[in-house]
Image (cartoon, rainbow, N blue to C red):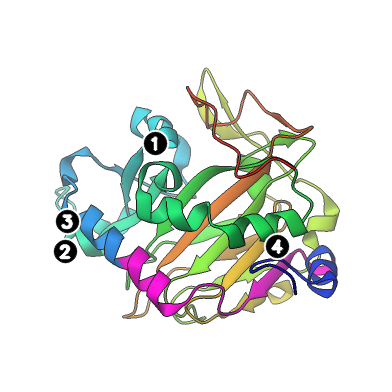
Amino acid sequence: MGSVGSLTPEQVQLFNSQGYLVLESFSCPEEIDGLRKRMDELLDGFDCSTASIFSSKNQKQLTDNYFYESAEKISFFFEEKAFDDDGNLKQSKQLSINKVGHALHELDPVFKKFSSSAKISSLLSSLGYKRPVVIQSMYIFKQPGIGGEVVPHQDNSFLYTEPRSCTGLWLALEDATIVNGCLWALPGSHKNGLVRRFIRDEEGVHFDHPSPSYDHKDFVALEVKAGSLVVIHGDLIHQSFENKSAKSRHAYSLHVVDTDGCKWAPDNWIRRNVGPEPLYVS
């Protein structure tokens, strides 16, 4: 292997074959600890009254300007099950947040350092990116007991370029297991193309087609240790289930698209006022 983060030809071949790749020990314990501690600080300073609810099932009803504007901000989204019938949090905000997004990689120095690190750039160069940009970042909590399901989806549905160019980088900040809601992938599904798109128009946001049904037995559980990075092809069908355990499953997720020869779709949900800076230009 050459520079840190770069993939071997065998790893690239495996990624192209199955649509995902698990890189163990991509981040050291000190780096993971730094990201987690920084998120603790951000949560401590966060005013609960300004947040929104996130759901992968009913985003149309729950979408508001807070969601749209989060593309260029650090915004906080609650779990659907975080509130009681009177609209009050059932437990502390630290245990009620679904995710923080979508510009941690730009606006917070700790998350920016990881997101724009040489090892991330080396990895993307191995995958053929010429002028990559991180288009969104998310810190995902998968809270114990209430961490919500993320239904089967493809990242290119939400972050569409022509031609398609999205890759997801999912860093486990805690061990991810079947019990606490690890990722599940449908191997090879990226070869079947894009199923549907998530469109933003005058009616808000919505999918242009209903979701196909999938057979759970065809999926593979991606159980990984903290520090592992899961690389996800933009057309790969993947999901995660509710976390019904007593242990959280923190992760930091980046989504990257190429801006060399790839056009950002104007009807994507993300409509930035300022274009993102490329990680490198090759």
Q: Amino acid at mark 3?
A: Asp
Query: In the rendered image, which residue does mark 3 sit on?
Result: 44
Cα–Cα span, label 4 and label 2: 34 Å
**For residue 2: magenta?**
no
Examine the image and state in which quarter residue 134 appears.
top right
Q: Within 10 angstroms of label 4, few (less than 14), some, or many (20 or more) residues?
A: few
Q: Is residue 31 left or right of residue 253?
A: left
Q: Is residue 269 left or right of residue 260?
A: left
Separation of residues labelled 3 and 4 (CA atoms): 40 Å
Q: For the residue carrying disc 2, how many other residues have a C-alpha within 10 Å: few (<14), some (14-19), or many (20+)?
A: few
Dot 3 or dot 4, earlier in sequence: 3
Residue contact between numbered discs 1 and 4, judged by CB atoms under 8 Å: no
Q: Amino acid at mark 4?
A: Tyr
Q: Which residue is mark 2?
A: 91
Q: Which residues are magenta?
A: 17-36
Instruction: State the separation of the CA atoms marked 1 and 4.
Output: 31 Å
Foreground tag (1 vs 2): 1
